[in-house]
Each structure stands twice: as C-alpha cells, then as structure tokens.
Amino acid sequence: MSKTESASAITLKGSADIVTEFFNYGINSIIYQRGIYPVESFSREDKYGLAILMTKDCELQTFIASILKQLKHWLMTKEVQRLVLVISNFHTKETLERWEFKIQCEGELDSGGKPKSKDIKEIQKEIRNIIRQITASVSFLPLLDNACKYIYILPDL
C-alpha cells in the first residue's frame, strides 16, 4: 500500500481547553472514518452542530485521555507547535497516513496588556469547519485494507 501524507496541515487556534477538547473529537473522527476500530465500538455525540462518533472502548478512551492530558499541559505552556497522528500498518509499522495539526497560540494583547479573547461561537465555527475538512479528506484517501494501528507523535516542538 502506498504511503499517504497530508498535503497541508490543519491549523488549530484557541484556548488549551478548547483545542484539547477539539483534538479529542478530531482523533475519534479520524479513527472512526478510517475504520481503525469497528463501527460498533463508537457512539454518536452531537458537538459543534455536528454528529461526531466517539469511541466506547475503555482502553482506547484511557489512552486518548492520557495523550490529551499531556497535550493540555504543552498547550498551556506553549511548548507545542504541531501534533501528528500517524496511522501505520499493524504488522510492518509502515506509515500509511499522517495527519498533521499545526497549533497557533493566540498571543495578541489588548490595550490593557491582557490576552485578547475570541468569541466562543467563532472558535466553534472554526472547529466545525476543521471536523468537516477531516470528513471530506477521508473520501479522497485509499481504503485501508490492512490491519492498522495508530500512534501519536507528540509534540513536534
């Protein structure tokens, strides 16, 4: 199977809590859309005006939670600029897909020297658009016909 890599990165903006929450939904969307886990191990959740399928697998939930905990720390300390989710062949460990998420820390200050805040509705709209971008991207990718696993490469400092 040929190696498929993202042509351009997906950019995430917002607070550490929001980006961490989004990444949870993004990871689950990719895992579901790419068929890494069986369909029956997901349940529907409405978020950002979209139906997102989230894993019900306790082991996977625990693994993702540990990644997200570390991610939140890195976001709060602005130590991360990029996260990469890699889907690899279970047996050969060959990289089949690479999903890259660029992180942009909001660093602008208002006239009082405080960080500017962004409207939550605008952030949610941006997140909704990224989730749609993930879903649309899947239709262009080849089927993964080998047993796959995913690994995270965190962070790219």
Image (cartoon, rainbow, N blue to C red):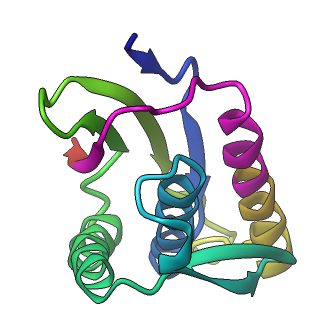
Q: Is residue 103 above or below residue 99?
A: below
Q: Can residue 110 be seen in the rendering of this structure?
A: yes
Chain part drawn in magenta: 131-152
Q: Position of residue 81 (x, y in %)?
A: 36, 44
Image quadrant where one finds the C terminus: top left
Outermost residue toward the left?
92
- Please report the residue visible at 80 percent of the width from the left and 53 percent of the height from the top: 129
Residue 110, quarter of the rendered image? bottom right
* 145 falls in the magenta region: yes
Can residue 117 be seen at all in this image of the molecule? no
Q: Would you place residue 38 above or below residue 120 in this image? A: above
Task: Indicate the position of residue 10 as horizontal and vertical percent values.
Answer: 59, 40
User: Which quadrant: the N terminus?
Assistant: top left
Task: Determine whether, in the image, residue 80 is placed left or right of residue 29.
Answer: left
Q: In terms of image quadrants, where is residue 118?
A: bottom right
Instruction: Please report the residue visible at 24 percent of the width from the left and 55 percent of the height from the top.
Output: 79
- In the rendered image of this protein, does residue 59 appear above or below residue 125? below
Determine the residue positioned at 54% across, 77% down.
40
What residue sits 75% from the left and 68% below the top?
123
Question: In the displayed structure, would residue 65 be above or below residue 143?
Answer: below
Q: Is residue 149 highlighted in magenta?
A: yes
Q: How many marks?
A: 0
Instruction: Give the x, y percent position of residue 57.
Output: 36, 83
